[in-house]
Amino acid sequence: MKRVEAIASGRVQGVNFRRHVKNIAAGHVVGGYVRNLESGDVEIVAEGSEPELKSFLSAVMEASPPIDVRNIEVRCLEPSEGFGSFEIRR
């Protein structure tokens, strides 16, 4: 089990990006959350197996217009919360 904390930048707010991330998470065995940041970026925190997390983040990067993910900064950490599901936080 691993944890990733990622910051997605680009055109990621006001384009249903958080819903997109939640839908992708539903197809993977990951728990965590996605939320908008005041900077205009979006934070993604997810826990799962390394292969699931890699697949999840890869799918997040492949968003369709009008979403335009330019960059995702990812930090890999040890899991800490044991999320039971994946949610959108406001």
Image (cartoon, helix red, strand yellow):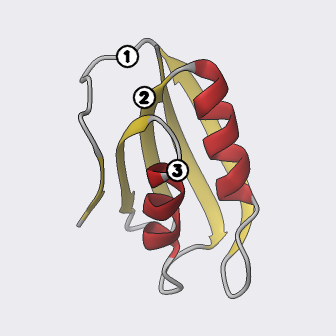
- Pointer 2 or 3: first along the chain: 3
> Is residue 48 shown above or below 58?
above
Residue at 67% x, 49% y: name it.
72
**For mark 2, what is the residue?**
47
**For mark 1, what is the residue?**
79
- Pointer 1 or 3: first along the chain: 3
Instruction: Indicate the secondary structure of the residue bearing disc 3.
Output: loop
**For mark 3, what is the residue?**
27
Q: Position of residue 44 (x, y in %)?
A: 46, 48
Quadrant that contains the C terminus: bottom left
Residue at 26% x, 23% y: name it.
82
> Is residue 16 shown above or below 74?
below
Q: Amino acid at mark 1?
A: Pro
> Is residue 2 shown above or below 32?
above
Q: Amino acid at mark 2?
A: Glu
Q: Position of residue 45 (x, y in %)?
A: 42, 40
2 and 1 marks in contact (CB < 8 Å)? yes
Q: Position of residue 73 (x, y in %)?
A: 65, 42
Task: Determine the image quadrant of residue 81.
Answer: top left
- Pointer 2 or 1: first along the chain: 2
Q: Is residue 72 left or right of residue 15?
A: right
Crowd band around label 3 with a 10 angstrom C-alpha radius: few (<14), some (14–19), many (20+): few
